[in-house]
Image: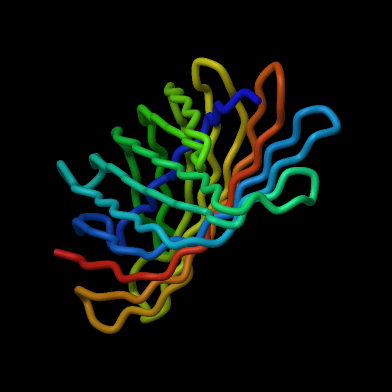
Amino acid sequence: MKWLFGMGLAVVSSTAASQNTLDFRLVSGAYEVEEGADELEAEGGVGFNLKGQFHVNERLFIRANYLTAEPDEVEINGQDLDGVELEGTFFRVGLGLGGVNENLRYYGALEFGDVELELSGSGGSVASDDNGLVVSVGLGDNGETAFLWEVELGLVQFDEVDGGSFEFALGYRVNEQVAILLSGQSYAVEDDVAEYTLGHGMLGVRIGF
C-alpha cells in the first residue's frame, strides 16, 4: 500500500490582528485509506500539536505548525491488527496576509508542508514522506468578544498527492492572553493509487502575547 498523504495542519489566525499567539493542544487522530476494494482505518491514541503565529506588522504574519498523532487501533477490511500503530508527523511553515473589519477577521496564507507516515508493528515498519505547498483562506471573529471562532479552507498540492482541507476552532477567552480551544480538522487527498482522509480532534489552550 502506498503511504503518501498530501496533508498538513493549517494554522489558525490569532485572536487579534496584531497579536502573536502560541497554541498547545492534545490530539486524537482518525485515518482512513481506500485502495480499490481494500480499506484501512486507524483511530485512538494521543498526540500533541504546537503552533504559533507571529506578526511582522498589522497585516503580514509568519506561522508554523508541528503535529504528531499516533492512532493505535488499526483495522484492515474490518479485521483488527493487534500491536500495530500508525504514526503521523506533520510540519508546516509559511507567510500570511490578513485584516480585520467591523465584524470579521480574514486572512490567506501560503505555506510549505511536509508529512511523514509510519506504520509499525512486530514485523517491522514502513514509512513515507511527502511535501509541497498549501494555500489557505480563513475567517474568524474580530476578537472583541469572549467567544472565539475560526474556519479555514485549504488547497493542498504536494509532490505525489493533492486535495483539500477544512478546519474549525471554537473557544472561550478567559482573558486577553488566554483562550480555551476545541477544534477539528478534516482532509481529503488522493494519488494515483488510493484515496486518503484524515481527521483530528483537539483540545487545548491559546496564549497571546
User: Is 59 on the left or on the right of 98, as rendered?
Assistant: left
* Quarter residue 174 falls in: bottom left
Residue nearest the viewer, comparing 106 with 90:
90
* Quarter residue 131 falls in: top left
Residue 122: image location, x then y, percent: 50, 42
User: Is 34 on the left or on the right of 10, as rendered?
Assistant: right
User: Is 138 on the left or on the right of 13, as rendered?
Assistant: right
Count of marks placed on residues: 0
Tell me which colouring the rendered structure shows. Answer: rainbow
Residue 162: image location, x then y, percent: 59, 25
- Please indicate, yes or no, whether residue 168 appears anywhere in the rendered image: no
Residue drawn at (43%, 33%) of the image: 115
**In this picture, is 197 found above or below 27?**
above
Q: Is the C terminus in the top left, top right, bottom left or bottom right quadrant? A: bottom left
Residue 147: image location, x then y, percent: 42, 78
User: Is 29 on the left or on the right of 32, as rendered?
Assistant: left
**In this picture, is 104 found above or below 41?**
below
**In this picture, is 127 found above or below 55?**
above
- Please indicate, yes or no, whether residue 202 appears anywhere in the rendered image: yes
Residue nearest the viewer, comparing 173 with 188:
188
